[in-house]
Image: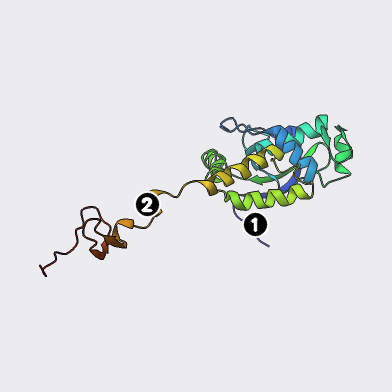
Amino acid sequence: MTTPDGFAGTELWPIDDLQPHPDNPNEGDVGAIMTMIATDGWHGSVLCQAPKGRRKRPRIVAGHTRWAALRALQDDGLTIDLGDGERLWPYAELAGRVELPPAGQVPVELRSLSDLVAARKLVSDNQASRLATTDEAALAAVLQRLREEDRLLGTGFDDDDLSDLVGRLRDLDAAPIPPDEFPDVTELATEHRCPSCGYEWSGSSRAGAQPAADNDE
């Protein structure tokens, strides 16, 4: 197996040794990510620029919030209801329920990146999520199925979020049809009758349309 150029490998690294990127423009929801990790465990790794020169610590390129959330869990645990009432779960107990890295460590993917490439990946990783679109009907179906099994916890959504989503979809279903989706009723054939003489004819209902002249007089 060959190793691609610039790829230094994936390994466990002391979690306190990672250095957040100084130009990171995003501020993630650490608390929400802590709940996700505590509920379903850890997956993947934190992408880091390998140490070089005078910088002896890996610099985070992608995964700032996940790193911060894991670090907070390892330090303080999390007060959460995991099915037996809300209480403080120390990290060691959480690790007995779901798959988590060893205390004090985090999986890191080290890449030998230039500062310019690292900055570009920092921005592109965040932007990739923003460019995604959501099929809200499909999302609502998944969330409703999870709620039926009491498994919404850890998704980043709660009952209120789901209710708002379903309500929004219902409002869209009840919305009036836009005018440009109606048929052109001015071109439909209709029956006409003169109220004075009783003459009948078929033709367009377009305003201004007149019956053909009667030449039998």
The numbered mark, 2 or 1, whose residue comes first in the sequence reads 1
Residue 137, position in %: x, y?
A: 60, 51
Outermost residue on the bottom side: it is: 216
User: Spatial distance from mark 2 to mark 1, Cα to Cα?
Assistant: 57 Å
Dot 2 corresponds to which residue? Answer: 180
Disc 2 residue crowd, few under 14, some 14–19, many 20+, Cα 10 Å: few
Residue 59 against residue 199 in the figure, above or below:
above
Q: Which mark is residue 3?
A: 1
The residue under the point 59% across, 53% down is: 5
**Is residue 41 at all visible to an observer of this figure?**
no
Provide residue 94's location: percent of width, then percent of height.
Answer: 85, 40
Q: Position of residue 69 (x, y in %)?
A: 73, 35
Which amino acid lies under the numbered mark 1 shown in the image of this protein?
Thr
Q: Nearer the viewer, residue 216 or 112?
A: 216
- How packed is label 1: few (under 14 Cα within 10 Å), some, or many (20 or more)? few
Q: Is residue 160 visible?
A: yes
Q: Residue 155's mark?
A: none
Q: Is residue 40 above or below residue 68?
A: below
Which quadrant of the view contains residue 35? top right
Foreground: 55 or 118? 118
Q: Is residue 37 left or right of residue 173?
A: right
Classify the position of the C terminus by image quarter. bottom left
Identify which amino acid the numbered label 2 is placed on: Asp
